[in-house]
Amino acid sequence: MRPLSDFSSLTVVRGFLHSLVAVLLVLACVRAVTTGADGPAVVAVCAVFTAVYAAAGLRPLDVTSRRGAVTWLAALGAVWLALLILTPDAIWVAFPLFVLQLYLLPARWGVAAVALTTALAIGGFGWHQHALTSGMILGPLLGATVSVIGVLGYQALHRESERRRRLLDELTATRAELAAAERSAGVLAERERLAREIHDTVAQGLSSIQLLLRAAQRALATGAPGAAGHIERARQAAADNLAEARRFVRDWSPPILEGRSLPDALDTLCATTADESGLLVNLHVSGTPFPLPTTAETTLWRVAQSALANVVRHAEAGTAEVTLSYMDTEVALDVVDDGVGFDPGAQPAPGTRQDGAGYGLAAMRARARAAGGDLVVESAPGRGTAVAVTLPCRGNTDGVEAVAG
């Protein structure tokens, strides 16, 4: 059931219905008074009809229950029937009754109420005219048919409109949830990127400085020469990593890649690692080098930097081999050491180790994925470790092309 006040969403329709009832009642009163036929009685019944109608038709009276709607419509119909007995002009009041019955009652009940009202209207008008013609029958029938089609059609449109409104609300809510999820994913991705960049810049630099200062400390303790050289290299490492941190804040490429090729930058990285750690590091370049996008060069250099840092800190190796391979459809970087190795499947999740380490391999994999490539780690206890990253590329008319992404 619906309260008549629901017409508030259709102000024009509600106003038209109220106006129609008022005009028809005034017309019945005027005709009754001017013709002198039961004028006072007609006016009195019209006043009662107006009072009953106003009880729920003008105020937002709750007739949402079936009993409330039936009671109100029955009272309104009884008053209308009394008016129909007094004057044939009451037949026209049946038309707004059709709308009310169809709107407030379930479809089956509404149609039955309209049929009963139509029959009473035809019978009452024929009783007043002492005859029953086809016009007396067709007029109320056509009015009832139009009312049924109009009101039921409106209700179907209203249901469809409500369905679309609910769908729109759900879509709006879904879009809000999606936007929130995207923001959350963006925050997590940015956190991952920050962790990766900090690991590859600040953490790697501090690790190198720590190694150099330890070497200087040992030299000073034993009186061996070279302490000043270790300190100077630590100072230079601090300066270089400060520049890297600043570039990281601006999201630029590593300073070592500015104005030089990737093989040259890797050669410098291998020489620096060997000088700082005493590890023998060799660089091999396979194929014909060609320019790569900044993202690809940064990815390969960062992976090499992180892999060599892991070799120095964890592998206890004597030799590390770095191989950069330029091929027709891909570019590959391999870092292989002869150290103690480990079980890749037994490694704890990043950040779960007591020393807070463990981000290296995860950061390398994330970098490779972000550049559209893949990273593979092969190792076993006592058999060394191999880290391989592969990025896709495609050939061009000159025989070289940049890495995709």
Image (cartoon, grey):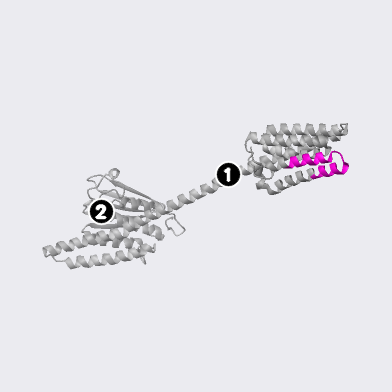
Residue labelled with disc 1: 166
Q: Quadrant of the N terminus?
A: top right
Residue 293: say if magenta: no
Q: Please, is residue 45 above or below residue 307 in the view?
A: above
Looking at this view, is 184 or 21 the one in front?
Answer: 21
Q: Which amino acid does the dot numbered 2 rest on?
A: Val
Circle 2: is it few (<14), some (14-19), or many (20+) Cα within 10 Å? many
Q: Quadrant of the C terminus?
A: bottom left
The number of numbered discs placed on residues in the rendered structure image is 2
Is residue 31 highlighted in magenta? yes
Majority secondary structure of magenta residues: helix
Q: Position of residue 161 (x, y in %)?
A: 63, 44
Q: Which residue is mark 2?
A: 311
Nearer to us in this view, 287 or 382: 382
Residue 58 in the image, given as x and y percentages of width and height: 69, 45
**Could one spot residue 105 in this view of the protein?**
no
Closer-to-camera residue (92/44): 44
| Residue numbers of the magenta segment | 26-50
Please determine whether, in this image, residue 170 is positioned above or below residue 243: above
Tag 2 or tag 1, which sits nearer the N-term?
1
What distance separates the C-alpha of mark 1 from that of mark 2?
A: 60 Å
Q: Is residue 131 left or right of residue 6?
A: right
